[in-house]
Image: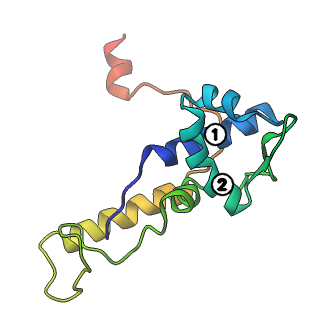
């Protein structure tokens, strides 16, 4: 039941967004600078993206990273699972061991519900976010400003 997200997942999502924004090929050091990472650490986030077929890595002096295709339907959850591994590994939220299923801990059911909601939200969140919404004031805030 454990769900852990590391900085590598964040870097992977930011790298995909940066590649989509540029629309071309970026050298590793250039992409690392854009996403705020070292070139070596960025490579750890990019390897799973290349393996998943979302990014192309071309070696050589004219090489670099580029998108292998459109990312329109790619979710944040898919990237997290590509980088971190499966989110449902059958492990207990409290102990580093298998979840018993029967005779579970007191947190089993609430954690399962919360985890289900979190995964659904990550799955519904596209890597390429739509334009940010303009925040609207609540009715109370509008009333105060009068």
The disc at residue 41 is: none
Q: Mark 2 points at which residue?
A: 49
Residue 117, position as x, y percentages in the image: 39, 62
Residue 29, position as x, y percentages in the image: 67, 30
Contact? badges 2 and 1 (CB < 8 Å): yes
Quarter location, residue 59:
top right
Q: In this view, does 128 lie above or below 145?
A: below
Q: Classify residue 120 as left or right of residue 73.
A: left
Q: Is mark 1 on a helix, strand or loop?
A: helix
Residue placed farthest to the right in the image?
A: 62
Question: Which image quadrant: the C terminus?
Answer: top left
From the viewer's side, name the closer residue of 69 and 34. 34
- For marks 2 and 1, give the CA distance: 10 Å
Q: How crowded is mark 1: few (under 14 residues within 10 Å), some or many (20 or more)?
A: many
Residue 13, position as x, y percentages in the image: 58, 44
The disc at residue 15 is: 1
Q: Residue at position x 25%, y 66% from top?
A: 111
Residue placed farthest to the top in the image?
A: 146
Question: Which image quadrant: the N terminus?
Answer: bottom left
Q: Is residue 89 above or below residue 43?
A: below
Q: Residue at position x 82%, y 36% from top?
A: 23
Q: Classify residue 1 as left or right of residue 43.
A: left
Q: Is residue 23 above or below residue 59?
A: above
Q: Residue at position x 44%, y 62% from top?
A: 119
Q: Classify residue 94 as left or right of residue 82.
A: left
Q: Classify residue 138 as left or right of residue 84.
A: left
Residue placed farthest to the front in the image?
A: 60
Q: Residues within 10 Å of mark 2 (few under 14, many from 20)?
A: many
Residue 30, position as x, y percentages in the image: 69, 27
């Amino acid at each position: 039941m454990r769900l852990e997200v590391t900085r590598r997942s964040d870097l992977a999502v930011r790298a995909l967004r940066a590649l989509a924004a540029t629309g071309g090929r970026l050298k590793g050091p250039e992409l690392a600078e854009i996403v705020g990472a070292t070139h070596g650490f960025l490579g750890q986030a990019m390897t799973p993206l290349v393996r998943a077929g979302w990014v192309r890595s071309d070696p050589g002096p004219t090489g670099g990273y580029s998108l292998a295709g459109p990312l329109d339907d790619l979710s944040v959850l898919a990237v997290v699972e590509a980088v971190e591994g499966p989110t449902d590994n059958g492990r207990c939220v409290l102990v580093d061991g298998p979840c018993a299923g029967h005779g579970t801990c007191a947190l089993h059911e609430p954690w399962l519900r919360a985890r289900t909601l979190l995964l659904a939200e990550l799955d519904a969140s596209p890597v390429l976010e739509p334009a940010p919404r303009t925040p609207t004031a609540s009715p109370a805030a509008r009333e105060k400003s009068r």
